[in-house]
Image (cartoon, helix red, strand yellow):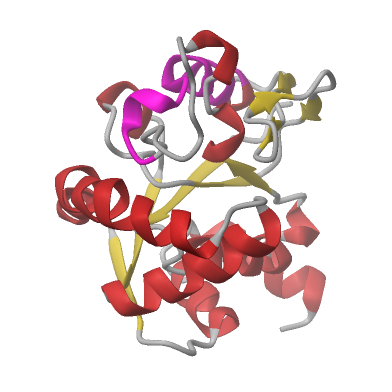
Amino acid sequence: MTTPVFMLGVTGGSASGKTRLADALAELFEPLGGYVLSEDDYYIDASEFEDFDADTFNFDEPASKDHRLLAQHLRTLKSGASVEAPLYDFTTHTRRDVSARRVPARILIVEGLHIFCTPELADIFDLKVYVSAGEPIRLARRVARDVAERARTESSVREQFALNVQPMHALHVEPQKTCVDLLLENKGDPDFKAMARRVAGLCPSDIGVEINLKTGV
């Protein structure tokens, strides 16, 4: 692939809306082959930890992810080659037996809690975006998500939020605001398509021109 890959990173607190923004960006950039890679798929397999307990394990610590592998895959994609990305199962807390083939595109969107925490990883991104949301919004959305999608009880989610999520947010997530190119506020019911347009405005001009030509927008 001779066309350069533009790497766009979206971070923010747990349940802040970063995934919905990433999905809106993927929809916007779909004519250019854009898609989302999730940092969550790079969680380290539970079998690598002694006496793993999902109710007490700190999923909100950067060390819970394999940033070295993610950085390697992003550099490979930027070089124009494909990768076989892991797929993480939150019900078993293990990597699935199958992988997902990821291919280079004009623009790729990476979303996750800690993608700018590790310098080796942060340096790969061409544009960094942070989605900010207040603690009550994030807690309510995390409870709804984890109970519905990750086989958790509401009490365990609330306990984990108090013990790990919020302290780790202050320690690792919030400081990422200082290194981003764009800070977006989620106050409860944002227009993610409008937010995606704001992000697109910071992308290289040729990307904007290509979107307009392909979509007629």
Is residue 71 magenta-colored? yes
| Count of residue discs | 0
Determine if residue 200 is in view: no
Q: Residue at x 39, y 70 (%)?
A: 138
Is residue 156 a member of the stretch shown in magenta? no
Displayed quadrant of residue 213: bottom right
Please give left or right for residue 200 compared with residue 32 in the image: left
* Residue 144, x across and y down, in percent: 57, 71
**Could you tell me which residue is drawn at 75 percent across and 30 percent down?**
102
Work out whether 155 lies above or below 215.
above
Name the residue nearer the viewer: 195 or 11.
11
Using the rendered image of the protein, determine whether residue 126 is visible from the camera's viewpoint: yes
Horizontal and vertical percent position of residue 79: 60, 20
Q: Residue at x 37, y 50 (%)?
A: 160
**Is residue 29 placed above or below 6 in the rendered structure?**
below
Q: Is residue 184 left or right of residue 15?
A: left
Which secondary structure class fits the magenta region best?
helix
Q: Which residues are magenta?
A: 60-76
Q: Quadrant of the N terminus?
A: top right
Left or right: residue 7 versus residue 119 is right
**Residue 94 shown left or right of residue 140 in the figure:** right
- List x then y, in percent, for residue 174: 20, 55
Q: Position of residue 94 (x, y in %)?
A: 66, 24
201 shown above or below 164: below
Whether residue 80 is situated above or below residue 17 in the rendered picture:
above
Residue drawn at x 45%, y 26% as measured from the top left: 65
